[in-house]
Image (cartoon, rainbow, N blue to C red):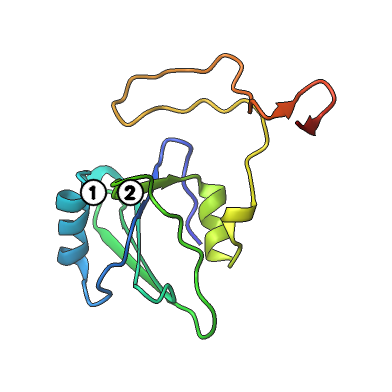
Amino acid sequence: MFSWGPATRIYLAAGATDMRKGFEGLFGLVRDRLQLEPLSGHVFLFSNAQRNRLKLLIWDGSGLWVCTKRLEKGRFWWPAADGNEVKVVLSSEELALLLGGIDLAGSRRRAWFRKMVPDDGVERQNPRNIDSNYDTINHKQV
């Protein structure tokens, strides 16, 4: 299994992808459909329409990796993009859960400090970074 640092983003391509695509085809999808740089070192994840196959594309500094996983039974959970978004950003923990067969729709992130850097490269910070539906004093969902 790969491990990535906190600066590595994981982009999931919304919708179905033709799993016959290889290095060049996935490279083109990242560049043209997701509007991202394939040689950035970020991770790009694709799935077929049946959600039983995944492909992962990543540049390691010396070459492209394409990793594939096929499920014998069942389907991967695949998040829906908001509106006409073509990509969803996942954390490394969410990717591990997705690959492990966990449905992320029923899970939620706990309220704790996590500095997020937006795609434009400008660092912003929510000083409280607290889920508005979470009572931090009594430690329960409101």
**Height in image: 71 above or below 45?**
below
Q: Disc 1 and disc 2: Cα gap in Å? A: 6 Å
- Rendering coords of residue 142 (x, y %): 75, 31
Residue at the extreme top of the image, as rendered: 127
**Height in image: 74 above or below 123?**
below
Relative placement, left or right, of 62 versus 104 is: left
| Earlier-in-chain disc, 1 versus 2 | 1
| Along the viewing direction, whichever of 48 and 57 lies nearer the viewer | 48
* Residue at 44% from the left image edge and 76% from the top image edge: 52
Q: Name the amino acid, label 2.
A: Lys
Q: Which residue is mark 1?
A: 34
Relative placement, left or right, of 107 versus 137 is: left
Q: Name the amino acid, label 1.
A: Leu
Residue at the extreme right of the image, as rendered: 138
- Rendering coords of residue 105 (x, y %): 57, 54
Residue at the extreme bottom of the image, as rendered: 72
Q: Quadrant of residue 109?
A: top right
Number of numbered discs overlaid on the protein picture: 2
Please say if the residues under marks 1 and 2 sit with CB atoms less than 8 Å apart. Answer: yes
* Element type at mark 2: strand
- Rendering coords of residue 76 (x, y %): 50, 69
Check residue 48 in the rendering and tell me which mark sits there, or answer none: none
* Element type at mark 1: loop
Q: Quadrant of residue 96?
A: bottom right
Check residue 87 in the rendering and tell me which mark sits there, or answer none: 2
**Height in image: 23 above or below 138?**
below
* Residue at 27% from the left image edge and 48% from the top image edge: 61
